[in-house]
Amino acid sequence: MDLQIEGFTIYFARGIRAALPIVLGYLPLGFAYGVLAREAGLNLWETVLMSVLLYAGSGQFIAVSLLSSGVALAAIIFTVFLVNLRHLLFSASFVPHLRRFKPGVLALLAAEITDETFAVAISHYAEHEVRLPYHFGLHLTAHFSWVLASLLGGLAGNLIGDPARFGFNFALPAMFIILLVMQLKDKKMLLVAGLAAIFSVAIAIAWPWNWNIILATILAATLGVILEPWTGRS
């Protein structure tokens, strides 16, 4: 039993350490969300509760933006659902690594997946054996930092005034740009990223119903797999 507890502690601590770069990004980003949420009319507890239950940076930013614009609740829910459909792809990518675990455990892990924790975990599992304590340490640390930052932003929201003056509206795009740059390590990744950008813009122009992100991701990833034999040679 002592060995099991020690093993759990070791891998949980590794997950916490792996989450620290994410925490450094989540603190300013979550703070920006908290400020914008209060600006949109949410009270402090509503602001924090959204971070606890929804826990989706882009989805939360979009939700508060639409709320401040007076968009109907049903439209907000549908839009956030479409934006977060990419998590289906994230979850599917974990299947080869996590299929042996029980559905209840997988449900907990799936509820905590974000763009950042997915990128860290999938890179880790490419070279290491899957350990649930590592996954929980990674996810819980990242989620706690997001909730804490949301709380701090919510507390400061009424004191800042117009958040656009401080560039808070650009916080989320900045985070995604950093994640993209970190992934551009070879010709294949650069090709897929370029194709995804082209597809996303083209689909958004031709069919403005918020499907451009998920459709562009699927198309670019599919072409990346098809072209891998050629791009992988150089």
Image: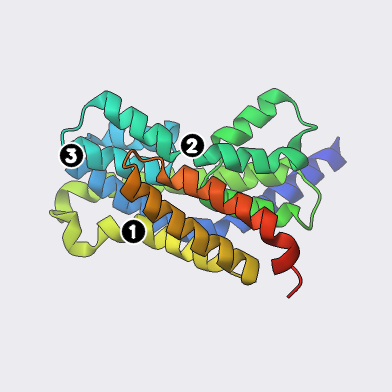
Residue located 30% across and 60% down the image: 170
User: How many angstroms separate mark 3 from mark 2 (CA)?
Assistant: 23 Å
Q: What residue type is labelled 1?
A: Ala
Q: Name the quadrant of the C terminus.
A: bottom right
Q: What residue type is labelled 2?
A: Leu
| Residue 218, percent from left and from top | 55, 46
Q: Name the quadrant of the N terminus.
A: top right
Q: How crowded is mark 3: few (under 14 residues within 10 Å), some or many (20 or more)?
A: some
Identify the residue position indicated by label 1 in the image. Answer: 171
Please indicate, yes or no, whether residue 183 appears anywhere in the rendered image. no
Residue located 77% across and 45% down the image: 130
SS state under label 2 = loop
Nearest to viewer (mark 1 / mark 2): 2
Nearest to viewer (mark 3 / mark 2): 2
Identify the residue position indicated by label 2 in the image. Answer: 85
SS state under label 1 = helix
| Residue 50, percent from left and from top | 36, 34
Mark 1 or 3, nearer chain start: 3
Q: How crowded is mark 1: few (under 14 residues within 10 Å), some or many (20 or more)?
A: some
Q: Residues within 10 Å of mark 2 (few under 14, many from 20)?
A: some
Q: Where is residue 109, by image quadrant? A: top right
Please indicate, yes or no, whether residue 136 appears anywhere in the rendered image. yes
| Residue 61, percent from left and from top | 32, 45
SS state under label 3 = helix
| Residue 140, percent from left and from top | 56, 42
Q: Residue 68 carries which label?
A: 3
Mark 3 or 2, nearer chain start: 3
Q: Where is residue 168, by image quadrant? A: bottom left
Nearer to the camera, 175 or 137: 175
Mark 1 or 2, nearer chain start: 2
User: How many angstroms separate mark 1 from mark 2 (CA)?
Assistant: 21 Å
Q: Is residue 197 left or right of residue 124?
A: left
